[in-house]
Amino acid sequence: MPIEPPPTNWELPDPAYADENGVVGLGADLEAGTILDGYRRGLFPMRIARGGPIAWWSPDPRAIIPLDGLHVSQSLRRSCRRFEIRIDTAFSDVIRACGDPARPDGWIDATFVLAYETLHRLGWAHSVETWRDGELVGGLYGIAIGGLFAGESMFHTENDASKVALVALVSRMRDAGATLLDGQWMTDHLRSLGAIEVSRERYLELLDTAIDQPIELFG
């Protein structure tokens, strides 16, 4: 069971105060209690730009992946047979690969790595990994609260490796009875996998239901 950290010292703002870019506020900190409070309110932290201030975001619309609507092509099904899936065996390697500074628009710096490693040790942050011949070749990480998995980032060094991790995550969520897979912003990549956009209001309704579910996705 995840360990609840000390509560945050900050009062994070209501998502309704988000500007046209989805920014709700700047500042606060990356303590475990602060980050979890943000997710429970429908917010997530990300820097404005590489090296910029911490911002708390609530996009409108919000990208989610319906658990019954994941698009798995025949080629992706074949790829699923090529990789081994592991859970939480290389969390630090996954988040550091996602934060590779050579990636375009990279924003996952050392402070975020340390913050999410702490959340991982407490049982809130998790990695779904794809391995091939004993080598980590892809994966994703995010935050699990009840029936919510808030996806943060993914990476791959072999074709389809991150997609295979997503297929494994969705299967795990379905089996557990989870209800909400958050993708934050829509991208062409997510759309190709079946992601849809919902309003902020609808997302918050789905969130309230999800985080109240007595589920331990990675228990």
Image (spheres, rainbow, N blue to C red):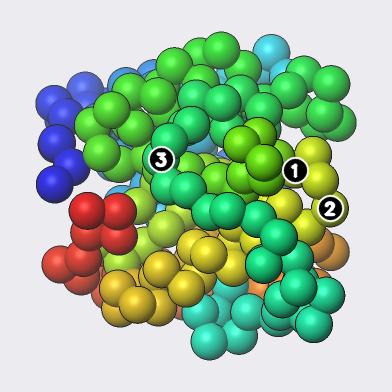
Residue 203 seen from this side: no
Q: Residues within 10 Å of mark 2 (few under 14, many from 20)?
A: few
Farthest residue to the front: give it: 133
Q: Are marks 1 and 2 in contact (CB under 8 Å)?
A: yes
Residue 166 rendering spot, x and y as whole percentages: 60, 61
Residue, disc 3: 88
Q: Earlier in the sequence, mark 2 or mark 3?
A: 3
Q: Is residue 182 above or below residue 6?
A: below
User: Residue 206: x, y in percent?
Assistant: 38, 74
The residue where tag 1 is placed is 156
Residue annotated with mark 2? 159
The quarter of the picture where residue 116 lies is top left
- Measured Cα–Cα span from mark 1 to mark 3: 16 Å
What residue is at 69 percent from the left and 52 percent from the top? 162
Left of 152 or right of it: where is 101? right
- In space, the residues marked 2 and 3 are separated at their CA atoms by 21 Å
CA–CA distance in space, label 1 to label 2: 7 Å
Q: Which amino acid type is marked by label 3?
A: Asp
* Cβ–Cβ under 8 Å for marks 1 and 3: no
User: Which element type, helix, strand or loop, lies under badge 2?
Assistant: loop
Name the residue type under label 1: His
Q: Residue at x 23, y 32 (%)?
A: 122
